[in-house]
Image (cartoon, rainbow, N blue to C red):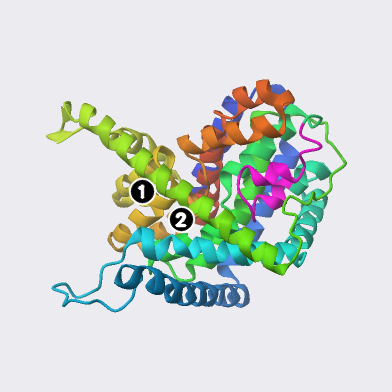
Amino acid sequence: MQAIIGIFVVLGLAWALSEHRREVRWLPILVILGIQLVIAATLIRVPFITQHLNHLNVVVNAISSATSEGTSFVFDYLGGGQLPFELKSESPPYIFATQLLPQILVFAVLVAILWYWRVLPMLIKGVAWILQRTVRIGGAVSVAAAASFFVGMVESPMMIRGYLKSITRSEFFVVITCGMSTVAGSMMVLYVLVLGDVVDSSLGHIVSASILNIFGSILIASVMVPDDRITTAGEVEDVYKYNSFFDALTRGATDGTKVVINIIAMLIVFISLVALINQVLGLISIGGEPLTLQRITAIVFQPFTWCMGIPWSDANSAGNLMATKLVINELVAYEQLGRTGGELTTRSNLILTYAICGFTNVGSVGILIGGISSLAPERRKDLLSLAPRTLISGTLVAMLTGSIVGVVSIVG
């Protein structure tokens, strides 16, 4: 009942924050919710599907093993090579910048190659076709929503940049909510590595979470900014125009480098800023412990994590992780879950793996505004009013997905 309550709480909050409550059409919303429940039950509870999702971790292991060859050559023992000294601890040091982040470089190259071979554009068209016929959204929006599963929050709107100035305000909100609620394919491998053994087939679950979040984004955005009109046109634009295989390889590596540098900068800046804020808040003590930004937001999230189906004994830790995702980013939250997941129940770890998935955080809003402003300057007014609201819509999408997983993980 907790998780069922969570679904109604999320829908109620989205409706309460809606721009036009009377215009919300509940039948399509319930249809999308039903689709999410069926997809979640299929991906989590059907043995044939779960066994094949387990095989996805082989991809992660292959990429990790191949990348370590390159990092150990460049960084020697800092990149995973043989240590020139004797360790006092049982396990060798695992350096985030030189051993984990380079995985993104290799995966970014693979994505570029798959784009050059037209595999990813065909997949995006296929997913967009399914979305148009299941949830009845316009062609332009369906392309951007489908693309958000594979690329980042700015790249997915680029697929329909010719339509950004003409789609409705509601469709525009769907597009940017999808971008904030999903994760780029190049990042998934990194999440799996920092999660460790918290859940079985972590890559399969992260892939499943992104799929559910696409439908959840359409649902929540349609409630918060309702509109019956749809933009029927929509084609996949060739965002990445590679001239040859080697062009895809080299530019993929360059693009991956930009992502890695951006991640390093964002982590340093936001973790430092949060630490600075915590030093100021720490002057206030509540219950014998210093006040922190995470502690404040964790208190807010605690009852909502309980509503997702997480036992109250785990709700405080779960609230902390959800707060970390919102205040800093999902990568740090996944890393913390990987370290502390052993203290939580198996079901709590599963729900949180889904609930943490997504780019929704304060820093992402800045990236979103900066990126889309250059793509569609005509929509800057809508962007400035709707982009901050994606912090709410993206969080509600994550809570809805967590609640759905909370329902299907216990039923049966």
**The stretch drawn in magenta includes residue 18:** no
State whether residue 163 is above or below residue 317: above
- Classify mark 1: helix, strand or loop: helix
Residue 17: name its quadrant. Answer: top right
For the point 63% across and 56% down, which residue is it? 211
Asked if disc 1 and disc 2 are in contact, CB closer than 8 Å, the reply is yes
Q: Nearer the viewer, residue 93 or 19?
A: 93
Disc 1 marks a residue whose amino acid type is: Ala
Distance CA(mark 1)–CA(mark 2)? 10 Å
Residue 412 seen anywhere in this rendered image of the structure? no
Among all residues in the image, which is located at the extreme right? Answer: 233
Residue 148 drawn in magenta? yes
Q: Is residue 176 above or below residue 96?
A: above
Disc 2 target residue? 351
Left or right: residue 276 versus residue 372 is: left
- The percent position of residue 360, horizontal first and vertical second, equals 51, 41
Q: Is residue 187 left or right of residue 381?
A: left
Where does the magenta region start and end? 144-164
In the rendered image, the quadrant that contains the C terminus is: bottom right
Residue positioned 37% across, 43% down in the render: 324
- Residue under the image location 30 percent in, 72 percent down: 77
| Mark 2 crowd level (few <14, some 14–19, many ≥20, 10 Å Cα) | many
Dot 1 crowding, Cα within 10 Å, few <14, some 14–19, many 20+: many
| Numbered badge on residue 318 | 1
